[in-house]
Image (cartoon, rainbow, N blue to C red):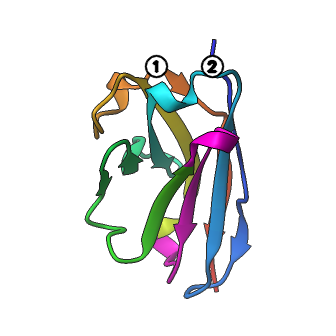
Amino acid sequence: QVQLVESGGGLVQPGDSLRLSCTASGRTFSSLAMGWFRQAPGKERDFVAVINGGITYADSVKGRFTISRDNGKNTVFLQMNSLKPEDTAVYYCAGDIGGWGAKTRTEYEYWGQGTQVTVSS
């Protein structure tokens, strides 16, 4: 079983930046498409970004967020710039076995516990 652990969340002001990290256990990382999702209180868990051979972003974060991965360290990153209050959410990383970069939450087999990002003035 793959275990994912996120880190890097925190409280920032609008316009600030944060870098989230997610590290996976085991040696299966390179076989996973890795995605980031986020969920605000009372809202559904929404797609943010995914990386496999290519990269896809949600329209709401395109141009502000950058996803990357280091397979040697079993880690995926989400660099978040120009943060807005509407970016406030718990951010989750997720792994999709043999995935091609799905945007649908139900297609991911592995999930981290999440890290809180709060953007407030």
| Residue mark closest to the camera, 1 vs 2 | 2
The x, y position of residue 57, in whole percent, is 31, 58
The x, y position of residue 78, in whole percent, is 54, 59
Left or right of 30 on screen, residue 113:
right
What residue is rendered at 66% in x and 52% in y?
21
- State yes or no: residue 34 in magenta: no
Q: Are marks 1 and 2 in contact (CB under 8 Å)?
A: yes
Q: Which mark is residue 2?
A: 2
- State yes or no: residue 81 in magenta: yes
Q: Amino acid at mark 1?
A: Glu
Disc 1 to disc 2, C-alpha distance: 9 Å
Instruction: Report the span colored magenta.
Output: 70-86
Left or right of 62 on screen, residue 73:
right
The x, y position of residue 10, in whole percent, is 74, 65
Left or right of 42 on screen, residue 118:
right
Above/below status of 36 relative to 117: above
Q: Which mark is residue 23?
A: none
Q: Which residue is mark 1?
A: 109
